[in-house]
Image (cartoon, helix red, strand yellow):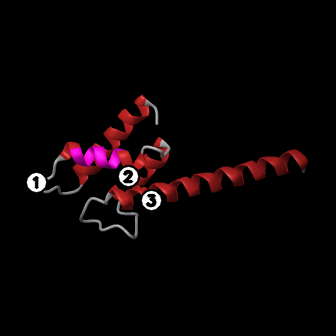
């Protein structure tokens, strides 16, 4: 991620943390560093989509009462990447069919 994307990722993660109860003992700065480290190679759009799905309670493997772990978030980010790539592939195939058909 670029510096600007890291800033957007930080905002998205802060929004995620604000939507779920946090322990009074949580070191928010360390938590943010851990999550950013876990998702640093992800596309910003995939991260934002994954966060949105957790906030909306759309992730079946997640517990809607608690913030997802960094590992759970990474799993959902990868799922969003796979879905984005599949949709792009389908879109590319449809465009190719239109050109040849």
- The residue identified by callout 2 is 51
Q: Where are the magenta residues, as a range?
A: 30-36
> Residue at the location (32% across, 45% down)?
13
| Sooner in the amino-acid sequence: mark 1 or mark 3 | 1
Mark closer to the observer (2, 3): 3
At which x and y percent is residue 68?
31, 60
Distance in Å between CA atoms under marks 2 and 3: 8 Å
Distance in Å between CA atoms under marks 1 and 3: 26 Å
Magenta stretch: helix, strand or loop mostly:
helix
Of 32 and 67, nearer the camera is 32
At which x and y percent is residue 80?
51, 55
- The residue identified by callout 1 is 25
Secondary structure of the residue carrying tag 2 is helix
- The residue identified by callout 3 is 76
Question: Is the C-beta separation of discs 2 and 3 under 8 Å?
Answer: no
Residue 98's place in the image compared with 71, above or below, is: above
Of 30 and 90, nearer the camera is 30
Mark closer to the observer (1, 3): 1
Question: Is the C-beta separation of discs 1 and 3 under 8 Å?
Answer: no
Mark closer to the observer (1, 2): 1
Distance in Å between CA atoms under marks 1 and 2: 23 Å
Secondary structure of the residue carrying tag 3 is helix
> Residue at the location (37% across, 40% down)?
9
Q: Is residue 73 magenta?
A: no
> Residue at the location (15% across, 52% down)?
26
């Amino acid at each position: 991620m670029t510096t600007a994307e890291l800033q957007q990722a930080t905002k998205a993660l802060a929004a995620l943390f604000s939507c779920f109860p946090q322990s009074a003992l949580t070191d928010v700065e360390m938590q943010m560093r851990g999550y950013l480290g876990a998702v640093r190679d992800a596309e910003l759009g995939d991260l934002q989509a994954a966060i949105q799905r957790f906030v909306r309670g759309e992730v079946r493997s997640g517990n809607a009462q608690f913030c997802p772990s960094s590992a759970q978030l990474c799993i959902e980010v990868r799922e969003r990447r796979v879905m984005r790539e599949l949709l792009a592939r389908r879109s590319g195939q449809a465009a190719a069919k239109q050109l040849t058909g």
